[in-house]
Amino acid sequence: MKFTFYGHASFAVEIADKTLLFDPFISPNPAASAIDIQQLAADYIFVSHGHGDHVADVVAIAQRTSAIVVGGVEVVNWLKTQGAPLIHEMNFGSHTFDFGRVSFVPAAHSSSMPDGSYGGNPGGFVIATSEGNFYYAGDTSLSSEMQLIPHYATLDFAVLPIGGNYTMDAQDALVAAQMIQCSKIIGVHYNTFPPISIDTEVAKSLFENAHKELLLPAIGECINL
Ligand code: NI
Ligand code: MN
């Protein structure tokens, strides 16, 4: 599995010959100005919820790549009205795609579309394939629901928000890592806006002291997992 970070909570995972792109918010993010969305590949685009900092570039990338946009019913149908050509709607539950099994799981957050339309329930994704398994929590607080994640898959890594304020901070994410039984965490959703700026060294040492790994790739950086 190859992970590439695109800033904020945007990333891609290359797995089972497919490129899975998550929550693309790249063109409005000044920190990600080196990333050209016209160059990004995607077979599937996963959308955790309706907020602008998760859906901004979905339609443009979906139109160019013909990627299938996967997410909650209300979110993906709204994206279809905005021009996304191919969608796969889900609600909380599991579905097997050509690359593996996807479980859309609850997140403790909110969801509305950028124009104020109803955005359904926010969620996260557990991706289970023959090459490996991972969990992307989306925007969420710490939630007892996370104890169910090991039931879906034994995780190789997890992508968790660590910026606080709107989501978990690093301290909460460490508890989440314990609940989901995963020791390799990639932190996202921090330092994009003032309310979510954090001291990354403090966050890393918090995880180190608990014998867990917190990876904070630079924007554009790839990690082989
Ligand atoms: Ni959000
Ligand atoms: Mn967000």
Image (spheres, helix red, strand yellow):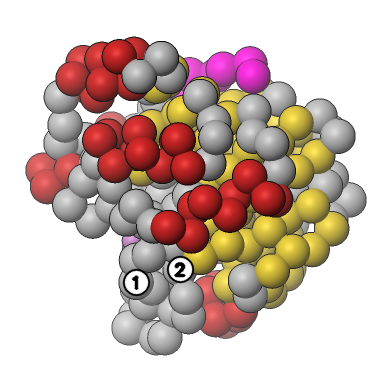
The answer to whether mark 1 and mark 2 are in CB contact below 8 A is: yes
In the figure, is residue 176 to the left or right of 79? left
Residue 7: tell me if it is visible. Answer: no
Disc 1 versus disc 2: distance between alpha carbons? 6 Å
Task: Name the N-terminal-most of marks 1 and 2.
Answer: 1
Label 2 beta carbon within 8 A of ligand 1: yes
Q: What element does badge 1 sit on?
A: loop
Residue at the spot x=64%, y=34% of the render? 155
Count of labels in the image: 2
Residue at the spot x=84%, y=45% of the render? 99
In the figure, is residue 170 to the left or right of 178? left
The residue pinned by badge 2 equals 122
The residue pinned by badge 1 equals 110
In this view, the residue in front, 109 or 208, is 208
Location of residue 111 in the rendering, given as x and y in whole percent from the top left corner: 38, 73
Residue 184: tell me if it is visible. Answer: yes
Q: Which residues are magenta?
A: 220-225
Q: Amino acid at mark 2?
A: Pro
In this view, the residue in front, 183 or 194, is 183
Please tell me whether residue 176 belongs to the stretch shown in magenta.
Answer: no
